[in-house]
Image (cartoon, rainbow, N blue to C red):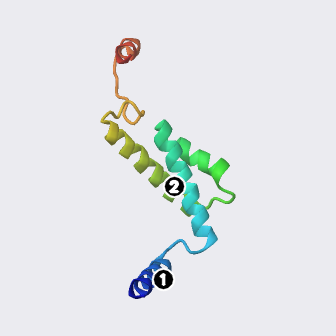
Amino acid sequence: VCWWSDNNIISSMVFYLSHFRNDLERRNLISIGAACGFASAFGAPVGGLLYSMEEASSFFSHDMLWKTLTATALASTCIAIYHGDFTRYSMLSLEIGDTTESLLARF
């Protein structure tokens, strides 16, 4: 019986301290998550933002715009760091000179 009361106290504390208790905050979190998934899959932070604005959100405020853009940039940077290649995800493309030769060398 003691473990039941401890578990109940912990779960009620987690629920009380949770920032995602209402539907608006849950929808915003889901929208940001969808944008981050899109951005990390395609390496396009702005593309993830636009996807979230068009498909995953019914209402999009200016505050949400900056939160989503920051999250998608962070997601794209993290996935590029994980793979160890910033050019693979179009994060940094600073090639000077003949680009056809460098593109063929990648494959």
Measure the C-alpha gap from mark 1 to mark 2: 29 Å
Up-down relation of residue 47 to residue 93 (above or below) = below
Residue sitting at the far front: 1
Of marks 1 and 2, the one in the foreground = 1
Up-down relation of residue 55 to residue 67 (above or below) = above
Q: What's the residue at 54%, 61% (across, down)?
A: 29
Say which quadrant the C terminus sits in.
Answer: top left
Q: Determine which residue is flagged by label 1.
A: 12
Q: Determine which residue is flagged by label 2.
A: 68
* Mark 2 surroundings within 10 Å by alpha-carbon count, few (fewer than 14), some (14 through 19), many (20 or more): many
Q: Nearer the viewer, residue 73 or 37?
A: 37
* Mark 1 surroundings within 10 Å by alpha-carbon count, few (fewer than 14), some (14 through 19), many (20 or more): few
Query: Which numbered tag is attached to residue 33?
Result: none
Please, what is the three-letter code of the amino acid marked with disc 1? Answer: Ser
Looking at the rendered structure, the secondary structure element under dot 2 is helix
Q: What's the residue at 60%, 45% (across, down)?
A: 51
| Number of marks in picture | 2
